Image: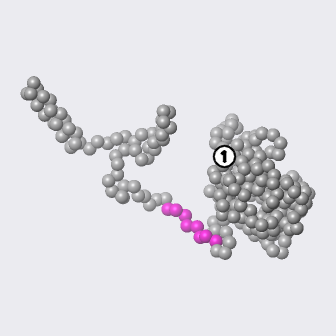
Amino acid sequence: MKVKQTSVLMALLAVLTFSCKEKVVVEPMEEIESESDGVITHSEYAGEEPTTPEETEYYEPKVPVVKPGENGAPPSDAIVLFDGSSLDGWMHTKDSTAAKWHLNKDGSMTVADKTGNIRTEQEFGDIQLHIEWKSPLPVQRNGQNRANSGVFLNGIYEVQVLDNNENDTYVNGQVGSLYKQGPPLAMASVPTGEWNVYDIIYHAPEFNEEGGKTKSATITVLQNGVVIQDNTEIMGTTPYIGWPKNPPHGKGPLMLQDHGDDSRVSYRNIWVREL
């Protein structure tokens, strides 16, 4: 028995020795999700473990250089939609006539009551948007009728603009909400009459050839530097009445709302970066 055991051990050692001399290459695995535990593996990080830092470094393609704006100016690659000098590039949504909102001496524009929503002539898909707005003084009205406006991505999906300072309303319709869908994570407004800042990251939805939605839009919003929407899924349109709908679409304009109640909301410093 001892002889047989010795022979078996020697044979195993021979196999292991031969195997160690041969470089074992593991074929990369496709990215899969295990149904049992939900763990995702990534094919680009499969295979033999790197042994030097250089094996996990690459230098192409080069990252584009963007010069940040100084003193509130847009970055170097931004598309400026409104700089206070004119309303060129904006038109009324209903009839495509030139925008009739008020152009102010301080470089802002103010909703002209009951003239209707305005939109950009340019259309966009995925964007980073910077826009500043303020509600008027003296304070007028209450609830949804106090300084109500809205920023519409793709001309369809509304981020609510509203003066909620000491002015309660339904939370999925308050300032910073994805209207009628997602309340904000916080109410981060400045005092009434001061300028609020929205910085928005928007990724448009995707549709198949038959018009079915294959990927929802998402939105991240910072209000005055505070995250109030964190990669929120946009389930569809944001109607005042009814469920969200998902009509297929491509690129669309940025639209600003005239709520029709003498809201007198003002906007300034509007620019986008296409992503």
Q: Is residue 212 above or below residue 129?
A: above
Q: Residue at x 76, y 48 (%)?
A: 172
Residue 4 seen in the figure: yes
Query: Residue 192: x, y in percent?
Result: 80, 66
* Residue 167 or residue 85, whichever sits in front: 167
Answer above or below: position of 233 versus 226.
above
Residue 115 position within the rendered picture, expressed as x and y whole percent measured from the top left: 90, 58
Callout 1 secondary element: strand
Q: Main secondary structure of the magenta part?
A: loop
Q: Residue at x 11, y 26 (%)?
A: 4
Q: Is residue 153 visible?
A: no
The single residue placed furthest to the front in the displayed view is: 166
The quarter of the picture where residue 146 lies is bottom right
Residue 139: image quadrant is bottom right
Looking at the picture, does residue 43 appear above or below residue 145?
above
Locate residue 53: give its quadrant: bottom left
| 69 relative to 19 in the view: left or right | right
Q: Is residue 246 magenta?
A: no
Mark 1 crowd level (few <14, some 14–19, many ≥20, 10 Å Cα): some
Is 63 in the magenta?
A: yes
Q: Three-letter amino acid code at disc 1? A: Glu
Q: Residue at (83%, 75%) from the top-left corner?
A: 105
Residue receiving disc 1: 233
Q: Position of residue 167 (x, y in %)?
A: 82, 57
At 69% from the left and 46% from the top, the residue drawn is 234
Q: Which residues are magenta?
A: 62-69
